[in-house]
Image (spheres, coloured by chain):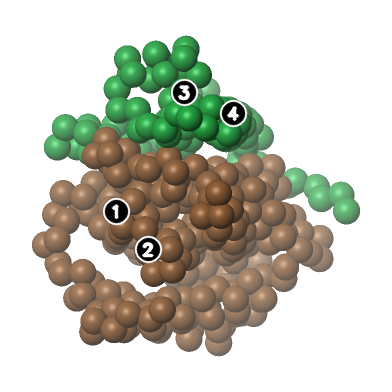
Chain colours: A green, B brown
């Protein structure tokens, strides 16, 4: 059944772009998680370790450790909504919808603050 | 291996249902992991929060392309949701979990009954294009193909609800959709399908704030989180497509039943009774 999309918020028209950003983030994340699953099956002698540092993540990826792929996949998924909001900041500004662009910036700032409090608070 | 398959199935059901009714699925995943699989509560909440992001991301791909999501309304309410989530994380246990559960139980029972009674009611009439306002929108109804136009009412109510939903999300580790969907639909005059789609988009940002904190504290166990996320991602894609085929009245009825069941569970937990 063909469905015609009629709702494009006037002046913005970037719902498809946002959808693509989400689809891209989800695809990369799922691909990394599946790669981790395959590696954990192939290298069943390795424990699925939690990676807690950037350096550990980088070395884990180069050594094909499943835990590193899992961690990176989850991190990519975590930051996909934030990437969507960042695109909205630019998209609304491009459409000269300054009010909405300011709101998106505020959301991004609050998100940054919550990350800061979560990690260092 | 068996546990991984069960976790994937739990994620699939949570994601499918969550995307269909705009709840995120965390409220289904957490009890399943803790009560039936014996997973520690913090690990379950962490897996659930990442699952909510997967539900939101996966479900929104479909809803955005179909034009049901009100992007401007979402970003407006997300300011309150994220602020509420920060407050929830900061004040934490200022209000006891039991008291919070009791209050929400009563509120949710009221909402679910109201939603069941008014499930087919037209919330907003059919405003003209010129009177849609800054936040109003229109979309093509998937089931019968007619164009639906709506104007957003009572924005302060939505912002207040967003603050509370974000606060609860930060406190309990759920998406907050159980409050945003009824508020959007019943309080702000947003049609059910648009309310589900818009709530679905907003949940990702709300859950993101809490999930980072759990990740930083080492509560994210890949052995639990990965199967749940993979299940949720697949389930939410199915749920969002399934949601397009369901009539909005039916969607509201299903949501009313789910809210009622959850409210009952919350009330019982407030009095120290756990339902297996």
What residue is shown with label 2?
B38
> CA separation, marks 3 and 2?
27 Å
- Foreground mark, 1 or 2, reads 2
Residue at mark 1 to residue at mark 3: CA–CA distance: 25 Å
What is the secondary structure assignment of the residue under circle 2?
A: loop
Front disc: 4 or 1: 4
Q: Name the mark on residue A65.
A: 3
- Mark 2 and mark 4 residues within 8 Å of each other at the beta carbon: no
Query: Where, quadrant-wise, is the C terminus of chain B in this rendering?
Result: bottom left
Can you say whether B5 is above or below A45 in the image?
below
Q: Residues within 10 Å of mark 1 (few under 14, many from 20)?
A: some
Q: Residue at x 16, y 32 (%)?
A: A120
Disc 1: which residue: B42
Q: Secondary structure at mark 3?
A: loop
Left or right: residue B190 versus residue B77 is right
Q: Are the residues at dot 4 and dot 1 in contact (C-beta closer than 8 Å)? A: no
Question: CA gap, disc 2 to disc 4?
Answer: 28 Å
- What residue is pinned by disc 4? A42
> What x and y, as percent, mark residue B51?
48, 49
Image x and y of residue B207, in percent: 39, 47
Residue A61 in view (yes/no): yes
**Which chain contains the residue that carries disc 1?**
B
Residues at badges 1 and 2 in contact (C-beta under 8 Å)? no
Count residues near mark 3 (Cα–Cα under 10 Å), then give few for <14, some for 14-19, many for 20+.
many
Measured Cα–Cα span from mark 1 to mark 2: 12 Å
User: In the rendering, at what x and y percent does residue B218 appear?
Assistant: 28, 39
- Image-based side of B275 in relation to B101, left or right: right
Q: Are marks 1 and 2 on the same chain?
A: yes
Instruction: List the single residue furthest toward the front.
Output: A45
Observer-nearest residue: B242 or B7? B7
Query: Can residue B154 be seen in the rendering of this structure?
Result: no
């Amino acid at each position: 059944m063909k469905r015609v999309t009629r709702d494009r918020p006037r002046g913005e028209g970037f719902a498809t772009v946002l959808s693509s950003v989400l689809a891209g983030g989800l695809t990369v994340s799922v691909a990394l998680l599946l790669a981790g699953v395959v590696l954990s099956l192939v290298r069943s002698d390795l424990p699925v370790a939690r990676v807690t540092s950037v350096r550990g993540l980088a070395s884990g990826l180069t050594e094909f450790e499943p835990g590193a792929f899992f961690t990176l996949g989850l991190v990519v998924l975590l930051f996909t909504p934030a990437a969507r909001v960042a695109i909205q900041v630019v998209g609304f500004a491009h459409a000269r919808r300054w009010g909405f662009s300011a709101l998106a910036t505020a959301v991004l700032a609050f998100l940054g603050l919550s990350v800061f409090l979560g990690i260092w608070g | 291996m068996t546990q991984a398959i069960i976790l994937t199935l739990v994620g699939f059901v949570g994601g499918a249902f969550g995307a269909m009714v705009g709840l995120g699925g965390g409220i289904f995943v957490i009890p399943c992991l803790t009560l039936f699989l014996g997973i520690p509560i913090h690990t379950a909440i962490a897996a659930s929060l990442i699952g909510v992001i997967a539900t939101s991301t996966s479900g929104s791909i479909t809803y955005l392309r179909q034009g049901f999501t009100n992007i401007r309304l979402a970003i407006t309410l997300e300011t309150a949701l994220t602020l509420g989530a920060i407050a929830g994380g900061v004040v934490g246990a200022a209000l006891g979990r039991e008291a919070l559960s009791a209050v929400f139980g009563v509120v949710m029972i009221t909402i679910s009954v109201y939603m069941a009674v008014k499930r087919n009611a037209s919330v907003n009439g059919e405003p003209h294009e010129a009177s849609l306002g800054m936040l109003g929108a229109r979309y093509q109804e998937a089931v019968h193909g007619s164009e639906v136009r709506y104007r957003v009412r009572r924005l302060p109510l939505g912002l207040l609800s967003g603050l509370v939903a974000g606060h609860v999300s930060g406190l309990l580790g759920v998406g907050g959709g159980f409050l945003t969907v009824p508020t959007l639909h019943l309080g702000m005059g947003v049609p059910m399908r648009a309310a589900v789609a818009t709530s679905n988009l907003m949940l990702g940002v709300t859950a993101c704030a809490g999930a980072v904190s759990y990740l930083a504290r080492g509560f994210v166990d890949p052995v639990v989180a990965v199967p749940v996320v993979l299940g949720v991602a697949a389930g939410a894609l199915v749920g969002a497509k399934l949601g397009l085929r369901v009539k909005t009245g039916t969607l509201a009825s299903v949501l009313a039943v789910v809210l009622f069941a959850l409210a009952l569970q919350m009330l019982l937990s407030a009095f120290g009774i756990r339902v297996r």
